[in-house]
Structure formats: structure tokens, C-alpha cells
Image (cartoon, rainbow, N blue to C red):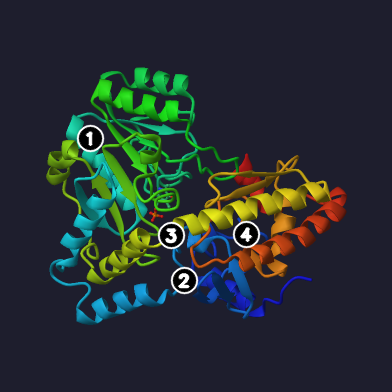
């Protein structure tokens, strides 16, 4: 039985009048099953409460920012205490130096840091730094990789000009030949190669990086003088306590960070190596809120937890438990379920489900059992989850697989998704 959602419905109606399209971005109308709540009242640990009062075990973690648990006591205490002393001020607090020291000590390739607000700020500054460093324009991206919603990289280009989206060449992730072809096409104008730490594109199976592909990316940058940028905004700290490609022995020149390193408080960063320092000091970049002290206090507290606890191993253990438990239950139900991506950032897709009708039904069924999953975007585990939470998700999954199995033959297409899947 679907959950009651009268408060959510009323807010949606009001939003439709005063917010374009009812909602923008990753919570735009139509991207999720109709019974999904759009508005939330509170969040604590691994759980969310929607405005109609339903408690949900949350496998989206705010699309990444929730790493240690929502409303974490010590991280939020650091935030609040710093906020009361002064947050947005005429200049930064001493914390900016401490945070730059902390992050450059944590990330092997990094010698300096610039702090900003959104992941898109960090990827934009990475591109500007690479262009300033090389005096060239072209950037190579992997097809389908997300680097933010600025005109040069937004996945839906309405409102951006062709000029803003010029000077880009594309390769296929993990495909060395296509990468080499893109480098050849860029000729003597290559400024940067952007690398996703893992292939975490929407709607498709995820892929871990092939170490040979990562090494070849580094070599091609070295041969051409272009900068290698690893965009760790999403995967950072869920794969390693270093840049994610450090696990492959490949060090970038620049890495972009965001989402979770202050556990949901607004801050992002571009980290860079010595080679790129001069260029980074020549570009002009800033924002009214970029010196805010309170998110930096939250970041320092979060990173202390990263250094001093087994949060990552804990999440990996839970991720393995979820993966193997789901595989068993899907197999027992006779359902073909593909689980891809790192276990801390899983994505589930059903076999023979090109328009996601099974995925949508299964997700709705999970929601009705108090578990918030996503039918086509990678999910996230957080360190506040427990094995009892994973078992709750597995019980819900078993019952939801049974419903999919029973209703599959009669399912119709998912109405509003077709424009995205085209
Ligand atoms: C979310 C994301 C961004 C953009 O971050 P925002 O904070 O949304 O601007 C950039 N790169 C990757 C890989 C992301 O997942």
C-alpha cells in the first residue's frame, strides 16, 4: 500500500506556482516514482523523515553529502560553535589555513587548496587553472560523466551557448583507444583531461577504473603537458582517505572535492600539485561565501573522523553485506539484478528493463517498506548505518522482489522518463 502523502502533495502544488517546473535539478518532477516524497522534515543518522512523517532508511545520503550520518553531534557542534563566533566575515578565519594544511596532508598529490562552495565551482576552477597553466583551451571528458551544472558541462544544454560548450572532446570511460583518439584530435591545444574516479554515470552500469586506463591518462598528460584532473566530488572519501585514483598508483595534478568532506555543510575544494600552483594563483576566482568559517570547522571535524576511525572499512563491510544479500535474494526470486559500482556507492539495474519499469516498481515497493533507494542514480552508504539497517533493507528487498516478479508481466512504461533515456 502506498504511503499517505497529503502534506507533500500540498507543497508540490504550492511549489508548482512559485518554483519553475515545480522543482529543479536532481529532484525535478518526474525523475522518481510518483509516490516518492519531494519534501523532508528532518534527518538523523542514516534516516530521513518526510513531511508526512514517514521514517525512511536513506540510501541517497543527500546525493552524497551525508558521510558520517545526518545531524552528527560533534560535527554540528563544531559548526554551530564557529558560526556563533563569526562565519561570513570580511576575510577568512584562521581555519582556512588549518583546513588547507589538513587536506594537503591527507591527499598525496596535493600541495595547495582553494575552497569554494559547490562541486561545480571546483571543477570550473580546475578547468581555468589548466587553461592558465597550458595557455590552451581543449578539455577531454568521458562521455556521460557528470562534472556539475555549469554551462560548459551541464548534461542538458538548454540555455548554454555552443561557444560555452566548445573546446571539448569526448572519450569512452576505460577505453584507451578512444582516449588516445581524443588526445590526437585535440592536437597541440590540450589543456586538461578530466577523469571520473569511477564511472558513476546515471542510467547505466557503473564501472571501476581500469588501472591501465588510469596510467595511460597520466602518461598522455605528461606527454602533452596537459593537466590531469580527477573529479572526486562524488566518490571522494568513499573509496579512499586520499584521492580515489591514488589507490591505482596514479596521481593527478588537480582534484576536485565537495559533497561530503564537511558532512553536508556547504564547502568544496580544488586541490593541486606544485606544478599547477602558479596558474592557480593567476586566475581570479571567489564568491561571497567562500571564506565562511563554520563549514571549515565542520570539515576539520569530519576529516578528523576520517583519519581516526574505521568509518570507511565499516561502510565497506556494510556494502558487501548489502551486495551479497541482495544477490542471494534476487537470485532466489528469479530476478536478474545487476549491482555495480564500489560497494559504498552501489547502483542497481534490473535485466531486461530498458525503460526502468521494474526498477521504478521495486523502488516504490522499497519506499513503502521504509527504505529510500534510487532507480537509476548511484546510491551512497554512510558511516551511521548499521548491519541491522542493512538487514532491514534486505527484508524489504525480498518482499519487493516478490511484487516485481508477480506484477512484471502487466507493467506499463514509466511515463516521464522517456525524454531522459532517449
Ligand atoms: C555533484 C558532482 C559535481 C557538482 O557538484 P555540485 O556541488 O552539485 O556543484 C561535480 N562532479 C561530480 C562527480 C559530482 O558528483
Q: Is 131 positioned to the left or the right of 76 in the image? A: left
Closest to the camera, between mark 3 and mark 1, is 3
**Residue visible at 31% across and 61% down?**
267
Closest to the camera, between mark 1 and mark 4, is 4
- Between marks 1 and 2, how big is the CA–CA gap? 38 Å
Closer to the chain start, of discs 4 and 3, is 3
Q: Are marks 1 and 2 in contact (CB under 8 Å)?
A: no
Residue 131 numbered tag: 1
User: Can residue 34 be seen by looking at this rendering?
Assistant: no
User: Which residue is tagged 3?
Assistant: 310
- Between marks 3 and 1, how big is the CA–CA gap? 39 Å
Closer to the chain start, of discs 2 and 3, is 2
Counting from the top left corner in percent of width and height, residue 372 is at 62, 64
Closest to the camera, between mark 2 and mark 3, is 3
- Between marks 2 and 3, how big is the CA–CA gap? 18 Å
Residue 373 numbered tag: 4
Q: State yes or no: Cβ of the residue under disc 2 lies below 8 Å from any atom of ligand 1.
A: no
Q: Nearer the viewer, residue 179 or 149?
A: 179
Q: Is 371 positioned to the left or the right of 189 in the image? A: right
Q: Secondary structure at mark 4?
A: loop
Q: State yes or no: Cβ of the residue under disc 1 lies below 8 Å from any atom of ligand 1.
A: no
Counting from the top left corner in percent of width and height, residue 204 is at 60, 40
Amino acid at each position: 500500500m502506498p504511503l499517505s502523502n497529503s502534506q507533500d502533495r500540498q507543497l508540490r502544488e504550492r511549489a508548482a506556482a512559485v518554483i519553475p517546473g515545480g522543482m529543479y535539478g536532481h529532484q525535478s518532477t518526474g525523475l522518481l516514482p510518483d509516490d516518492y516524497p519531494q519534501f523532508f522534515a528532518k534527518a538523523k543518522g542514516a534516516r530521513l523523515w518526510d513531511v508526512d512523517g514517514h521514517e525512511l532508511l536513506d540510501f541517497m545520503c543527500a546525493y552524497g553529502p551525508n558521510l558520517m550520518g545526518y545531524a552528527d553531534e560533534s560535527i554540528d557542534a563544531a559548526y554551530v560553535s564557529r558560526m556563533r563566533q563569526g562565519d561570513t566575515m570580511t576575510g577568512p578565519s584562521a581555519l582556512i589555513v588549518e583546513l588547507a594544511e589538513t587536506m594537503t596532508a591527507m591527499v598525496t598529490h596535493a600541495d595547495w587548496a582553494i575552497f569554494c562552495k559547490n562541486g561545480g565551482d571546483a571543477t570550473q576552477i580546475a578547468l581555468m587553472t589548466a587553461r592558465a597553466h597550458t595557455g590552451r583551451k581543449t578539455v577531454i571528458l568521458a562521455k556521460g560523466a557528470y562534472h556539475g551544472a555549469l554551462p560548459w558541462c551541464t548534461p542538458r544544454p538548454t540555455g548554454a551557448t555552443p561557444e560555452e560548450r566548445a573546446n571539448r572532446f569526448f572519450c569512452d570511460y576505460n577505453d584507451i583507444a578512444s582516449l588516445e583518439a581524443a588526445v590526437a584530435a585535440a592536437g597541440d591545444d590540450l589543456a586538461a583531461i578530466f577523469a571520473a574516479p569511477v564511472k558513476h554515470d546515471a542510467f547505466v552500469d557503473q564501472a571501476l577504473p581500469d588501472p591501465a586506463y588510469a596510467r595511460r591518462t597520466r602518461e598522455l598528460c605528461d606527454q602533452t603537458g596537459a593537466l590531469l584532473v580527477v573529479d572526486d566530488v562524488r566518490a571522494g572519501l568513499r573509496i579512499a582517505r586520499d584521492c580515489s585514483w591514488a589507490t591505482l598508483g596514479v596521481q593527478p595534478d588537480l582534484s576536485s572535492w565537495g559533497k561530503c568532506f564537511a558532512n553536508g555543510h556547504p564547502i568544496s575544494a580544488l586541490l593541486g600539485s606544485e606544478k599547477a600552483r602558479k596558474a592557480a594563483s593567476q586566475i581570479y576566482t571567489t564568491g561571497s561565501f567562500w571564506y565562511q568559517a563554520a563549514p571549515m570547522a565542520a570539515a576539520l571535524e569530519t576529516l578528523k573522523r576520517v583519519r581516526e576511525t574505521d568509518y570507511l572499512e565499516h561502510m565497506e563491510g556494510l556494502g558487501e553485506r548489502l551486495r551479497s544479500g541482495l544477490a542471494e535474494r534476487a537470485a532466489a526470486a528469479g530476478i536478474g539484478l545487476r549491482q555495480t559500482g564500489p560497494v559504498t556507492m552501489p547502483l542497481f539495474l534490473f535485466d531486461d528493463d530498458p525503460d526502468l519499469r521494474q526498477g521504478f516498481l521495486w523502488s516504490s515497493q522499497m519506499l513503502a517498506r521504509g527504505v529510500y533507494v534510487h532507480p537509476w542514480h548511484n546510491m551512497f552508504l554512510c558511516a551511521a548505518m548499521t548491519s541491522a539497517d542493512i538487514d532491514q533493507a534486505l527484508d524489504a528487498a525480498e518482499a519487493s522482489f516478490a511484487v516485481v516478479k508477480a506484477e512484471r508481466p502487466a507493467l506499463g512504461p514509466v511515463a516521464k522518463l522517456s525524454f531522459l533515456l532517449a
